[in-house]
């Protein structure tokens, strides 16, 4: 952690990470903790979507996915759940959520949206994607050593807005992109679902509370 970044401790901002979380697993949770530890953010909001725009319908209900996220974060008080997209219903567009958050936080609070590299590469397919940086920063998380091949439109967008250091995400309310590499746990929601269909164990892939919830409600069978 740089001295410059540490000096901005009073401007840590609001950090959000969205997803289908069908179900949430240790890979999601470990990435969230890595982000908190590395950047010294005070907290991170997990925002489960109601209806993903670029994926098929979730396998279980929005309420069940929300409950599993709530179960999954009980071990770390820095993690919180924001249910606004579930309560809003309908297709979940990030720009709508960020605008809502910006209205709540006011004009000066740094707002940081965390996305994986795969999601960032698909950014030009998002609704009103070029407006995202009007209301938030984007923190892109990738695997170590991965050099993405950005299409020209996205490459120009990135070059125009990329931060010179991660501290810039905490010194202004919005407008910057920073890429950081972490080593993720090799777990996916589809892996968990497939194991459930085979009636195989999902132990150590998800928190025990979530494993018990999935088993008790016969989810993903």
Image (cartoon, rainbow, N blue to C red):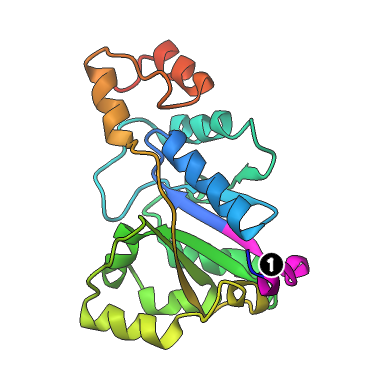
- Given residues 61 and 111, the one toward you in this image is 111
Q: Residue furthest right?
A: 10
Q: Is residue 177 above or below residue 156?
A: above
Residue at (57%, 45%) from the top-left corner? 33
Number of dots carrying numbers = 1
- Given residues 81 and 182, the one toward you in this image is 182
Residue at (37%, 80%) from the top-left corner? 158
Residue 20 visible somewhere in the drawing: yes
Q: Quadrant location of the N terminus?
A: bottom right
Q: Is residue 9 on the magenta stretch? A: yes
Residue 83 visible somewhere in the drawing: no
* In-image side of 27 versus 37 (left or right): left
Residue 48 coordinates in the image, percent (x, y): 47, 45
The residue range painted magenta reads 3-15
Q: Is residue 190 above or below residue 5?
A: above
* Circle 1 SS class: helix
Residue 11 coordinates in the image, percent (x, y): 73, 69
Residue 123 coordinates in the image, percent (x, y): 31, 68
- Given residues 13 and 183, the one toward you in this image is 183
Residue that numbered label 1 is attached to: 105
User: Residue 159's quadrant in the figure?
Assistant: bottom left
Q: Residues within 10 Å of mark 1 (few under 14, many from 20)?
A: some
* In-image side of 128 versus 69 (left or right): left
Residue at (40%, 27%) from the top-left corner? 205
Residue at (44%, 27%) from the top-left corner? 206
Q: Is residue 33 above or below residue 67?
A: below
* In-image side of 159 versus 104 (left or right): left
Q: Is residue 43 on the magenta stretch? A: no
């Amino acid at each position: 952690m740089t001295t410059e970044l540490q000096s901005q401790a009073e401007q840590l901002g609001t950090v959000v990470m969205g997803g289908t979380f069908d179900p949430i697993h240790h890979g999601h949770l470990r990435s969230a903790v890595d982000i908190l530890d590395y950047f010294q953010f005070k907290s991170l909001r997990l925002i489960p979507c109601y209806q993903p725009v670029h994926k098929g319908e979730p396998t279980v209900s929005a309420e069940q996915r929300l409950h599993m996220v709530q179960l999954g974060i009980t071990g770390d008080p820095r993690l919180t759940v924001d249910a606004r997209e579930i309560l809003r219903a309908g297709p979940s567009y990030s720009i709508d959520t960020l605008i809502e958050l910006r209205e709540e936080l006011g004009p000066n609070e740094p707002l940081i949206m965390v996305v994986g590299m795969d999601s960032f590469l698909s950014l030009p397919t998002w609704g009103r994607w070029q407006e995202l940086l009007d209301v938030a920063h984007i923190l892109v998380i990738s695997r170590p050593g991965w050099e993405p091949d950005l299409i020209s439109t996205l490459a120009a967008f990135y070059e125009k807005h990329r931060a010179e250091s991660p501290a810039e995400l905490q010194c202004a309310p919005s407008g910057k992109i920073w890429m950081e590499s972490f080593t993720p746990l090799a777990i996916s929601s589809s892996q968990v679902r497939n194991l459930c269909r085979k009636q195989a164990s999902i132990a150590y892939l998800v928190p025990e509370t979530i494993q018990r919830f999935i088993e008790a409600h016969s989810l993903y069978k």
